[in-house]
């Protein structure tokens, strides 16, 4: 008996439906944006400039949008989570803590975060045990920025450009477990290289949730509070190295800020 083979069509599995939308309309604007365009500045137009280093404390209320959420929530991530993912993906290069001018070879991303693991010691039945705790983005409470203030004679105004970012951890008191003021810088990243990543990373707008902001908006529009801890000096010393009193350090930081603000006023006087 002759058997006639039967053709069987290939069963194509159905595609899984897209996840439900978190909202009542499609929010795509933030992912389609690029970095805020900044005015072009020629070297010949810079008639005065001052390089300063500032410290952003993420525990301050105004700066908490850079720290939260501690774990990713939908499209929202903390600044440190975004930087870590971008560094591991090779989208941003990280440089050593002593290479804030980005002149040496970039750090190896995988080894960088492996080396940031910390020892943790505890006692079990009288036996002291030490384990290495992996680096956590929630341990970063300080963001340092290196920036340059300048007067552009073509536009007739005082302006600023951020050059680099440097996250830092705070040490904990071994007895109380409380955070101290001792900072441990981790690495430096060039801000211009990070801007395309920061521009598509949304930040929750506490004043109007329908108007999304990005981390690029936060830095370029100066929606943060920071304290100067160093200005460009021949000896490269930070303020704490030549002023011991904490109150006097704050006053010195304010004096530097005031001098910068007064430069624009003096421009119009002359």
Image (tube, rainbow, N blue to C red):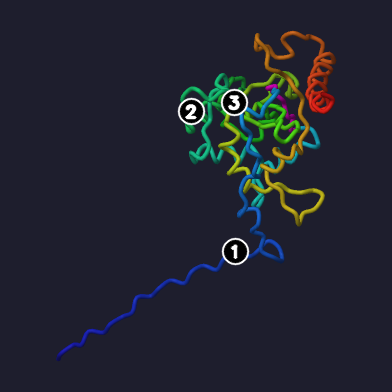
Q: Which residues are magenta?
A: 50-58
**Which label's residue is closer to the chain start, 2 or 3?**
2
Looking at the picture, tell me which residue is in the foreground, 179 or 229. Answer: 229
Location of the C terminus (image quadrant): top right
**Which label's residue is closer to the chain start, 2 or 1?**
1
Q: Main secondary structure of the magenta part?
A: strand
User: Which residue is denoted by mark 3 in the rendering?
Assistant: 186
Pointer 2 with pointer 1, Cβ within 8 A = no
Q: Looking at the picture, how far across and down is residue 169, in whole percent?
A: 66, 26
Looking at the picture, tell me which residue is in the foreground, 91 or 33. Answer: 33
Q: Looking at the picture, how far across and down is residue 3, in whole percent?
A: 18, 87
Separation of disc 2 and disc 1 at Cα? 39 Å
Does 48 lie within the magenta span? Answer: no
Left or right: residue 225 versus residue 161 is: right
- SS for callout 1: loop
Which tag is nearer the camera, tag 2 or tag 3? 2
Residue depicted at 34% across the width and 75% down the height: 10
User: Which residue is denoted by mark 1 in the rendering?
Assistant: 19
Quarter occupied by residue 60? top right
Q: Looking at the picture, how far across and down is residue 252, in whole percent?
A: 81, 16
Up the image or down, 1 lies above or below 32; here it is below
Separation of disc 1 and disc 3 at Cα? 37 Å
Quarter occupied by residue 122? top right
Residue depicted at 84% across the width and 25% down the height: 269
Which tag is nearer the camera, tag 2 or tag 1? 2
Up the image or down, 33 lies above or below 151; here it is below
Q: Looking at the picture, how far across and down is residue 69, in whole percent?
A: 70, 43
Pointer 1 with pointer 3, Cβ within 8 A = no
Up the image or down, 114 lies above or below 85; here it is above
- SS for callout 3: loop
Residue furthest front as drawn: 270
């Amino acid at each position: 008996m002759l058997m006639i083979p039967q053709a069987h069509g290939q069963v194509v599995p159905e595609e899984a439906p897209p996840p439900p939308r978190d909202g009542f309309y499609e929010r795509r604007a933030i992912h389609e944006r690029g970095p805020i365009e900044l005015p072009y500045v020629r070297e010949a137009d810079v008639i005065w400039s001052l390089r300063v280093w500032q410290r952003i404390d993420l525990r301050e209320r105004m700066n908490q949008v850079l720290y939260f959420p501690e774990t990713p929530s939908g499209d929202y991530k903390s600044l440190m989570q975004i930087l870590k993912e971008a560094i591991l993906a090779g989208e941003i290069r990280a440089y050593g803590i002593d290479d804030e001018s980005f002149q040496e070879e970039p750090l190896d991303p995988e080894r960088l975060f492996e080396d940031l693991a910390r020892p943790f010691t505890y006692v079990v039945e009288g036996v002291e045990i030490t384990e290495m705790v992996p680096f956590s983005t929630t341990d970063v409470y300080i963001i340092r920025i290196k920036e340059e203030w300048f007067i552009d004679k073509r536009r007739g105004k005082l302006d600023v450009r951020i050059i680099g970012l440097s996250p830092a951890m705070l040490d904990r008191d071994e007895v109380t477990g409380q955070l101290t003021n001792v900072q441990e810088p981790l690495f430096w990243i060039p801000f211009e290289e990070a801007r395309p990543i920061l521009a598509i990373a949304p930040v929750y707008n506490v004043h109007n949730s329908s108007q999304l902001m990005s981390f690029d908006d936060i830095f370029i529009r100066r929606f943060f509070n920071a304290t100067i801890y160093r200005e460009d000096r021949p000896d490269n010393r930070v303020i704490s190295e030549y002023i011991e009193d904490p109150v006097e350090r704050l006053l010195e930081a304010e004096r530097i800020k005031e001098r910068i603000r007064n430069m624009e006023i003096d421009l119009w006087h002359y």
